[in-house]
Image (cartoon, rainbow, N blue to C red):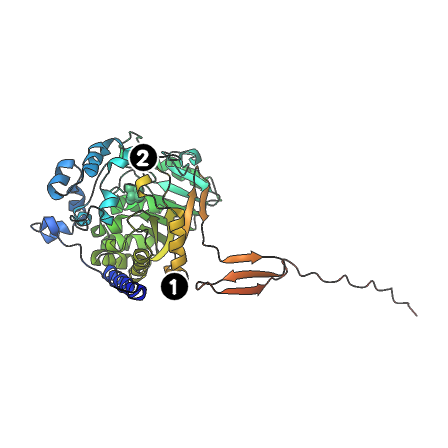
Amino acid sequence: MQSHIDLDEDRADLEATTFNFLKEFRSAGRGYWSNVSDADWNDWRWQLKNRIVSLEQLQRLLPTLTPEEHAGTMLANTKLAMAITPYFFNLIDASDENCPIRRQVIPRVEETHTANWEMADPCGEDSHSPVPGLVHRYPDRVLFLVTDRCAAYCRYCTRSRLVSNATGYDFHPEFDRQIEYIQQHPEIRDVLLSGGDPLLFSDDKLETLLQRLRAIPHLEFLRIGTRIPIFLPQRITPALCAMLKKYHPLFISIHSNHPRELTTEVREALGRLADAGIPLGNQSVLLRHVNDDATIMRAHLQKLLMCRVKPYYLYQCDLITGSAHLRASVRKGLEIMNSLRGHTTGYAVPQYVIDAPGGGGKVPINPEYILSHNKDRVVIRNFEGKVFEYPEAADGTPQISKPLEMEEPELV
Ligand code: SF4
């Protein structure tokens, strides 16, 4: 019989093997599209044109489709459309019903259920929208929605009320009104372009928008939120990078959730953006049976750094309608954060946040490192659980005893 020590060693060996495997960069390969020419395969427009968008295509390409996925795909066009690029589809492990890539992009019937607390607009964006397509929730920055289209659709998307237009939201951004609002609000110094995915625009269309924003004197900083480098790395062409680098300071936030998404193609695409001087951050969503595991999360974060991307936020999954089957618990999130801080490079550790339901904004969620705190001292614990004391300093201007009142010197 194996002892506890042997079992622990076996588990540690298995974890180390999984970890090392997840950290390797591989190509997504051609898979089902082995007859396609290099020119077509590497052309982002070909990838978009050949996306998997129907149940018939899915059944042909994925014979292991489950009844839940079959029913979910049939209903997707009334909730959030399905679209998967051939490149990304090749990352799916057809033999694994719980494949973490599959769970993110193939609809499931559970999406049609509404759990307690779930909402169509969990972050209250519509109620913070002074003009269509602009969300002004924080004092000095705005979210500028440019389109309702994405290269592929994430089944937990916070904006599923509008992206893909499956619910008939009929999103029509009005760039003139959005830009005019920003011009009239000098307190806005930062604009985040998002959607939908701004990198789906042609280079010219995106450049026109960036030019108009750069012409606003009080704008200090532009950002683009995109999942294109992950779903469609072919879009990150040298011409796109050369155009983007004219609009610095420009940051890009990508969205990746699992180490298997970081292929050699993605690493090269991100390298091109980084070479154009664009600081890159990543936003992940904590998803059940996708990345709610400390080993997977650590491999993902370390791999992001190898792609020159700083892990920025880890989001608790928003309370979007039909996402309960993908939502991991906050307890799990805290456990994972606890396994990261001190155990890996600080640069690899994202900020775990909950976007407060109804429009409260991002609230940082951290494991407890302060054990007690009074006017004399703070008691803290480190990543190993060791306890330390730190003396408290006086806040503000130090109290200086009142100077003695001097008598006027007598004149002689
Ligand atoms: S890429 Fe972003 S906007 Fe598009 S479906 Fe995914 S989460 Fe939603």
Query: Mark 1 vs ligand 1: CB under 8 Å?
Result: no
- 168 relative position to 45: left or right: right
Badge 1 or badge 2: first in the primary sequence: 2
- Image location of residue 341, percent across then percent down: 41, 60
On residue 162, which mark appears?
A: 2
- Image location of residue 297, percent across then percent down: 32, 56
Residue 261 appears in the figure: yes
Provide the residue designation for mark 1: 343
Pick out the residue farthest to the left. Answer: 35
Give the Cα separation between the discs numbered 1 and 2.
Answer: 40 Å
- Image location of residue 387, percent across then percent down: 51, 64
- Above or below residue 43? Residue 381 is below
Q: The disc labelled 2 sits on which kind of residue?
A: Leu
- Which tag is nearer the camera, tag 1 or tag 2? 1
Pick out the residue farthest to the right. Answer: 412
Element at badge 1? loop
Q: The disc labelled 1 sits on which kind of residue?
A: His
**Figure quarter occupied by ligand 1:** top left
Question: Mark 2: few, some, or many residues within 10 Å (few <14, many ≥20)?
Answer: many
- Image location of residue 121, percent across then percent down: 38, 35
Q: Please identify the quadrant where the N terminus is shown.
A: bottom left
**Which residue is more in the foreground, 258 or 281?**
258
Residue drawn where x is 77% and y is 61% of the image: 402
- Above or below residue 159? Residue 40 is below
Question: Mark 1: few, some, or many residues within 10 Å (few <14, many ≥20)?
Answer: few
Pick out the residue farthest to the top. Answer: 168
